[in-house]
Image: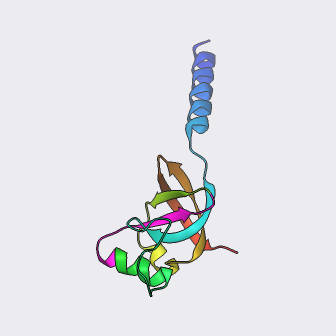
Amino acid sequence: MNKFLSLCLALVLTAGLSLAAPKQEDFVGNISDAMCGLKHGMEGQSDAECTLGCVKMGSKFVLADTAAKKVYQLSDQKTPEKFAGQKVKVTGTLKGDTIEVASIEAAQ
């Protein structure tokens, strides 16, 4: 009987943990920076130049979803550099307003 109860308890705990695990999602938007967010302010520069310039001055890379008018922080601050100013698909887990990045790729 004790083995049966232990097995049932283990199954319930395992099921509960798997339900609590956050699922990865895809987010589409442009790689921007936290200072500019949805709109770049440096006249005469491309979005990529503006983003990289702001990051050099201490800003962080973000994902700017212009359709939803939302800016997401990104846990990965290295990969976005090569996508600065470009439309991308970020796969990851949303925690608050931060995406825990699993991957970033160019969007169609």
Q: Residue at x 42, y 75 (%)?
A: 41
Asked if residue 31 is among those painted magenta in the image, a careful observer would answer no
- The N terminus lies in quadrant: top right
User: What's the magenta region?
Assistant: 55-67
Residue 23 image point, x, y percent = 61, 48
Residue extending farthest to the bottom is: 44
Q: Residue at x 59, y 19 (%)?
A: 3
Q: Residue at x 49, y 84 (%)?
A: 46
Residue 10 image point, x, y percent = 57, 27
The answer to whether residue 12 is above or below residue 99 is above
Residue extending farthest to the front is: 43
Q: Is residue 12 left or right of residue 61?
A: right
Q: Nearer the viewer, residue 10 or 21?
A: 21
Residue 29 image point, x, y percent = 59, 66
Q: Nearer the viewer, residue 17 or 23?
A: 23
- The C terminus lies in quadrant: bottom right
Q: Is residue 53 left or right of residue 44?
A: left
The answer to whether residue 85 is above or below residue 69 is below
Residue extending farthest to the left is: 57
Asked if residue 58 is among those painted magenta in the image, a careful observer would answer yes
The answer to whether residue 41 is above or below residue 28 is below
Q: Nearer the viewer, residue 43 or 6?
A: 43
Q: Residue at x 60, y 38 (%)?
A: 18
